[in-house]
Amino acid sequence: MNNLFSVGLLTISIIALNGCKESVDLSSNTYRASQSASAASNSNSATSQNATGVIISTTAPVTVVKVVKVDENEATQSNTTGSDSETVEDNEQEPTTTQPTETNEVTETVAVNTASCEAEATDINPFVRVQLHYGLMFDTPFINDEVGGLDSIKITEDAPQNSTILKLESTIGLKSGQLITYLGTDGFNRVAKVGDISANQITVASGNGIETDLKAGSVISNFYHDPTHPNNNGYKAVADFGVRSAFPIVPNQKHVLLGDSWFDTSESTGTTAFEDQLNSRLSGSTIINAGIGGNTLCDLINRFESDVATQIPQYVWINSSINDYFNDVSASDYKTRMQFLIGKVQALGATAIVYDSAPAVGTSFGGNDLTVLSNRYAFALLELFEEAQQ
C-alpha cells in the first residue's frame, strides 16, 4: 500500500451527515478518518428499555409500531441477546463466525427520526441470516488512519490453511486491527483481521487464522473504501459470504437486491461490485438491483410493492443498518421493521437472505454511540432468527 497521502482528518460524525449515501467527495482512494467514540465494554447481562416517542398499540397477536417525531433526549432503546444455532450443508464450508457478546447498558438519545413507517411484528418463517457483523467483519469498523480505497500487497511465501502469519513484500500502509481481504484457493473472497505488524510480516488476529491455503504471489488488500463502505474487493467478500451462508441456492432463479448503497451503484467508483459478484456466482439467475443509497428499513418497506413484489422473485437479499443507526432508529424498532419486511418477502413465496448490521464507531445524529447501536441491531436480528425457528 504505497499510495498513501493525506487529505485531512475526517471524522465519523462528518460521514454521519449523509449516512450511507457516499456523499463524501474523495480526491483519491486514500484518506484518513478519526474515531469519535470508544467501543462499549462487554458484559454477560442485558437490560431492556422502552423507547418513548414510539406509539405502540398491541392487538394480539401483532404489534403495530408507528414512529413519530420526538424531541432529542426524549427516549431510550432496548438491548437484545441470544445464541446462534445456524447450520449449513455438509458439503459446504461453514462461514467463519464469532458469537456475539453483550454490551453494557448505555442510555441512548432518540433524535428526530426522518424515517417514518408502520410495521407489524407478525410471525415469520425461518430465513437466511448472514452474520456480517460478528462473522465476516469480526466486529471491526473502519479504524483511525486506515488506508481507504483499494490497494494490494503481494504474499511472498506459501501460507497453509489456519496459518496466523503472512509474509508480505511490504507492510507499508497496514494498520493493526484493520480488515483485509484475500482470494482463497477455493475461489471465494474472504476477510481477515490484521494483528501484529513487523518487518514484511503480519499476524492474523481473526478466527483460527486464514481460512484457506494462500500461495506465494497471491495478494491481500484492504477491505474498506471509506468509513461506511467496502471497496470492490470488500464487496466481493460480502457477496461471497452471503452465497456461502445461503447455500444451497436454487439455480436459474430471480433475485432482487433490496438495500442501501452497499447494493446500489457506488457514487465514488461507479461500480456495482456486490451485484457483479452475485452474477458471477449465480450464473443463469436474474439479478435485479433495487439498492438505493441512503435508504433505511422504512424506505425499503415503503417501496417494497413497486420495487420487489412486481418482480415476483424467488430470493430477496436485504441489507439495511448504517442509515438506520445514523438516524437513531432504536434496536426494537429496527427489529420490528425487519420482521415486517421479512414477512412481506415470505408472503411472496420468496426466500429472504438478510445481512445483519455493519460494525460502526462514532456518534449518530442524536449523539448515540454507534458501536452500541450497531451491536444491538446484530442481536435484534439474532433474536428474529431464533424466534423464526420456533
Image (tube, helix red, strand yellow):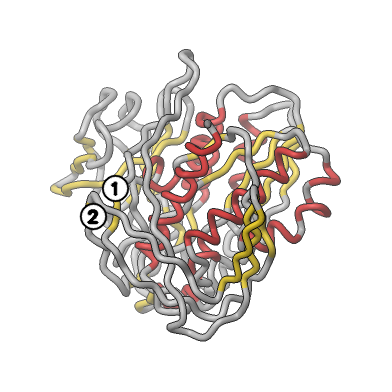
Say the numbered circle drawn on residue 49: none
Q: Which of these two is toward me, 143 or 314?
A: 314
Q: In this view, does 212 lie to the left or right of 349?
A: left
In the rendered image, which quarter is residue 134 located in? top left
- Within 10 Å of disc 1 (Cα), the crowding (few <14, some 14-19, many 20+) is some
Q: Provide the residue designation for mark 2.
A: 42
Residue 202, percent from left and from top: 20, 43
- Within 10 Å of disc 2 (Cα), the crowding (few <14, some 14-19, many 20+) is few
Residue 21, percent from left and from top: 59, 68
Amino acid of disc 1: Thr
Q: Is residue 337 left or right of residue 156?
A: right
Which residue in the rendered view is the most extreme toward the top? 91
| Residue appearing at x 34%, y 64% in the figure | 4
Residue 76, percent from left and from top: 42, 72
| Residue appearing at x 47%, y 47% in the figure | 234
**Element class at badge 1:** loop
Q: In this view, does 255 lie to the left or right of 71?
A: right
Q: Of callouts 1 and 2, which one flags the residue occurring earlier in the amino acid sequence?
A: 2
**Element class at badge 2:** strand
Which residue in the rendered view is the most extreme toward the right? 310
Which residue in the rendered view is the most extreme toward the left? 198
Amino acid of disc 2: Asn
Residue 225, percent from left and from top: 46, 58
| Residue appearing at x 31%, y 71% in the figure | 35
Q: Provide the residue designation for mark 1.
A: 101
Q: Are marks 1 and 2 in contact (CB under 8 Å)?
A: yes
Q: Is residue 101 left or right of residue 225?
A: left
| Residue appearing at x 39%, y 37% in the figure | 182
In the rendered image, which quarter is residue 25 located in? bottom right
Which residue in the rendered view is the most extreme toward the bottom? 71
